[in-house]
Image (cartoon, rainbow, N blue to C red):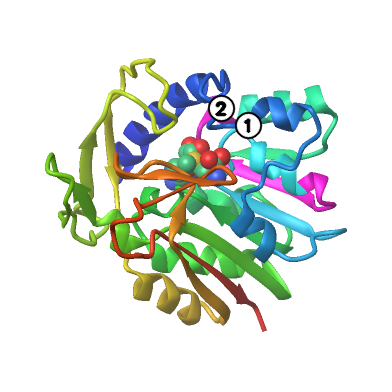
Amino acid sequence: MKEYFDANRRRWDEAVGIHVKSTTGAYRLDDFRAGEDILLPIESAEVGDLAGKRLLHLQCHFGLDTLSLARRGAIVTGLDFSPKAIDAARALSRETGVPGTFVLGNVYDAPSLIDGQFDVVYTTWGTTVWLPDITRWAEIVAHFLKPGGYLYKLDGHPAALALEEGKDGRLTPTYPCSQSDTPLIFDDDTTYTGDPDKLEKTRTYEWIHSLSTIVNGLIGAGLTLDFLNEHDRLAWKLFPCMQDAGEHMLRLPPDLPSFPLAYSLKASKP
Ligand SMILES: C[S@@+](CC[C@H](N)C(=O)[O-])C[C@H]1O[C@@H](n2cnc3c(N)ncnc32)[C@H](O)[C@@H]1O
């Protein structure tokens, strides 16, 4: 597993350098620096009142969402395994004066890196595919939640992640849900922001987990499902045919039937 994590981390280190430049506006750093709330409409509506809550943001990238959650009153800790991402998150916190604690480490090592429990564990947009073992991930989430605390999770829908758009524009089931020891292997020399900068580290190892694996993993870890929602829009251009849906989201063209592109859930620790 180490070789997969190492390759993915090297790739993320490189991508951070492109993302913090924010040339395409996919990461709304200027808006954040100007004091705006840059959370997208789905998580804004669903995450709940965060005032005074201790919040752990897993796979926080360079802290843009983490610090936006802090602006909503949460006392935030972000964790990510990319040193470049954590350096950038700390720099953004210093620059803007929005407080946050940022911890470098793999999600699977988090219990030995972060003390205490949290009111909210938060993880959104592009996190699950980097995790080989959802059962262990769910146990880690449960470990960090106080009784009465909750997980908020929002990500690409596995049914959508399994599709690929062909040259004829058709969306075809292509990628299977993967087991931990057999990741899906992708090679891509650009990142999802649409920035033309080329990446040297092109290879990633990823896992698509079915919705039932995720929900049953959380139930198995002792959490109770409060809601499970599906959404016809996404935060990034998963397929070339996707179109602007407004409010910084993308969706399928109107001639295609509505299809779930994202899902969100809240799960509480009794
Ligand atoms: C798409 S980004 C996070 C999404 C976040 N909402 C954003 O866009 O700002 C995915 C993050 O997961 C991190 N990551 C991937 N695998 C990880 C792991 N096993 N442990 C910790 N962080 C990981 C990467 O370094 C990257 O920063």
In the displayed structure, 175 sits above or below 149; it is above
Q: Quadrant of residue 119?
A: bottom right
The residue drawn where x is 81% and y is 60% is 53
Q: Residues within 10 Å of mark 1 (few under 14, many from 20)?
A: some
Q: Position of residue 243 (x, y in %)?
A: 40, 43
Q: Which residue is mark 1?
A: 28
> What x and y, as percent, mark residue 22?
56, 22
Label 2: state its secondary structure. loop
Q: Is residue 66 above or below residue 18?
A: below
Measure how far apart labels 1 and 2 are at the Cα level.
5 Å
Numbered range of the magenta stretch: 70-85
Q: Amino acid at mark 2?
A: Gly
Q: Position of residue 26 (x, y in %)?
A: 53, 32
Q: Tell me if residue 208 can be seen.
A: no
How crowded is the residue under tag 2: few (<14 C-alpha within 10 Å), some, or many (20+)? Answer: some
Find residue 53 and name its label. none
Q: Residue at x 68, y 38 (%)?
A: 102
Asked if the residues shown at circle 1 and circle 2 are in contact, with their CB atoms under 8 angstroms apart, the answer is: yes
Of residue 109 and residue 25, the one placed in the foreground of this image is 25
- How many marks overall? 2
The answer as to whether callout 1 falls within 8 Å of ligand 1 is no
* Residue 165 rendering spot, x and y as whole percentages: 20, 46
Left-right relation of 19 to 54: left
Q: Within 8 Å of ligand 1, the CB of disc 2?
A: no
| Quadrant in which residue 55 is drawn | bottom right
Q: Can the viewer see residue 152 in this picture?
A: yes
Find disc 2 in the rendering and name its residue.
25
Q: Is residue 79 magenta?
A: yes
SS state under label 1: loop
The quarter of the picture where the C terminus appears is bottom right
